[in-house]
Image: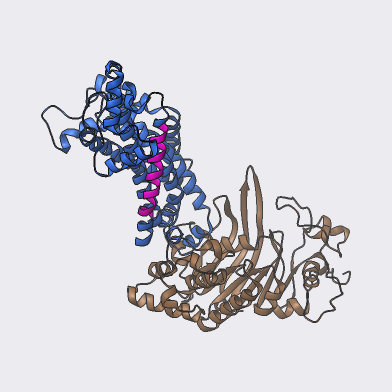
Amino acid sequence: MFKYILRKLLALIPKLLVMSVILFFALELLPGDALSRTMPPDQYQALSEAQKVAAREALGLNAPPVIRYFRWLNQIFHGDFGYSASTGQNIGTMLAGRLPYTIELSFYGLLLATAVGLLLGFLSAVMKNTIVDYFCTTISVFGISLPEFFFGIVFIILFSVQLKWLPSGGRMPVGAHGFFSRVPYLVLPVMTMAISLTAALVRYTKNSMMDVMGKDYIKTARSKGLRETTVSFKHAFRNSLIPTMTLIVMRLPRLVGGSAVIEMVFNYPGIGNMALTAVNAGDIPVVMITTMTTGVMVLLSSTLVDIVTAMLDPRIRLG
Amino acid sequence: MQENDHILRVQDLKTDFKVGRRTVHAVNGVTFDVRRGKTLCIVGESGCGKSVTAHSIMQLLPPNGTIAGGTISYYTRDGACEILSNYKRSGPRMRAIRGKEISMIFQDPMSTLNPVYTVGSQIMEMLKKHEKVSKAEGKARIIRLLGELGIPNPEIRYDQYPHEFSGGMKQRIMIAIAMICNPTLLIADEPTTALDVTIQAQILDLIRKMQESYGTSVILITHNMGIVVEIADDVAVMYMGRIVEFGSVQQIFSHPVHPYTRALMRSVPVLGMNKDQELAVIEGTTPDASTVFTGCEFAERCECARPECFHRFPKDTEIEAGHRVRCLLYEEGGEENG
């Protein structure tokens, strides 16, 4: 198991490198020269030709892209993420202020979706063709077929505007700090974020459970005289989780990427919001770093899910 | 015969399956006894209801299968009688019987072990369910049994997962699960069908060895006549959900009377037979299980069929002590005509 985890972590290195190569060279293909991507367009226009030449020389932008890629990588390794082209702020500082918020949002979203999705999927498989099953199936059809921001808007109208239970957006009241002052601000975005993954998981877990319940080893478990609850939980549920974990891994990019829209809807100051603002402003350095950060989050969390899967299934540990 | 000789008595068992809107009578009035410490073989072609009979005894039928009639009585070690067919499928009384009194091994060892638990823990689960033993004591007992079943290095194997075992070894593990609580009846549902021929003999030897050392009664389900003659004390030949002939292994093999039994015997190669001689084939195929019959189910494939066979149901006829046959040829006054 330890060897498996180590191998998985080592495999992260090439994955991250490939991602950074693709990202750097894709943005290199954009129109305009490298200098124009380091400052706002009007400022770039204001520069004289001589100033541009001098600036390129000073910033080392005359070097071929491959060299600049390695310089960029080297800077990132030293914690220097560069500066925003539109505001001139240090990107590292910007990230430090916002990343924890996004991690918090995504983490609770994933946790909620997994817990509720697996539970409802399990219940609707065990109580097949009962009211519980019909309820879960109906809910999951809505969750799968409607986009997340729709639920975000509905939740805001319902819980903030009409019922006035929860704030419609933001992070925490001015001057407040600590986890509990953040909770009311987290409820709606987390729910919105979790809803589509939950719906997918309910269906998937149910199908997977029903598939496993027909397996011969379930008959073996019953032939031992075990209780039906032991059979379905200990023997069936754990096996049904193995394919479900694959679904979670595949849905992670959508979860983390989807957080940008949700952060927008709830005016939540995370990196998704930061990335969208940067895209609108044509702020390439920030786009690069936020995309890279999102990629790292997806890779790390999918590695985590892989490790959980290996804990569930001994056959994976060897492979 | 005394009640005490029997461990299981199945009377007029009927098991139905709901397939869509139709009801299929998979087992249609089966009656037999299992003698204490002896082996009963149930033989028949695929789909004749032999497996369903076994699953009915254990109440392990799939959700669309139900016991529609008849009684299954089980006689415990202290002589008490439990009517299994009255118990709820997963109720506490049925669960107390499963594994502890009657246990079962299945056809395909590749899929009958749970892939995510070690084999040791899967055997331990059975033991802990039915007996109060300490962990160390239980483990020692399991390792001893694994050794008896011919598994090398049982201490190491105990902590391994099913995918680290070969098919034959997995079937040994299944036998260990079935035997760890020392049940009085072991039901083996085609335990060797999915295995190599060389492994088949080993597994059968093990079942016989277990039976000898623990005095277990065995119901062995098979379609292999060679296995029957090796291992059986009593034989039940099934066709289309009914037992067509029942008797001791001597009675069935030296004096088979039902045309179906005789046809089955002729279709099996025998050691030393002329290798140029063609094996006999039973003409036709087994009818669909939902076919409605007006007479003997075997009539259309039977070489001895007479016109009356097609519109009269045969009754069980005892032609010798313990030798029953369900054929019109042997009913009152029928014998001289046959």
Outermost residue toward the front in this view: A50
Q: Does the rendering let one see residue A1? A: no
Placement of A152 over or under A11, stated as above or below: above
Picture quadrant of residue A293: top left
Q: Position of residue B290 (x, y in %)?
A: 70, 50
Q: Residue at x 41, y 46 (%)?
A: A122
Q: Is residue B85 left or right of residue A134?
A: right
Choose between A155 and A269: the one closer to the eye: A269
Q: Give the brown chain's letter.
A: B
Choose between A250 and A25: the one closer to the eye: A25
Q: Residue at x 78, y 57 (%)?
A: B285
- Magenta residues? A8-27
Q: Position of residue B19 (x, y in %)?
A: 63, 46
Tell me if residue A22 is in the magenta stretch: yes
Q: Is residue A218 left or right of residue A71?
A: right
Outermost residue toward the bottom in this view: B213
Choose between A204 and A77: the one closer to the eye: A77
Q: Colour of chain A?
A: blue
Q: Position of residue A267 (x, y in %)?
A: 26, 25
Picture quadrant of residue B171: bottom right
Q: Quadrant of the N terminus of chain B?
A: bottom right
Tell me if residue A17 is in the magenta stretch: yes
Q: Position of residue A193 (x, y in %)?
A: 34, 33
Q: Does the rendering let one see residue A65? A: yes
Picture quadrant of residue B230: bottom right
Placement of A203 over or under B331, stated as above or below: above
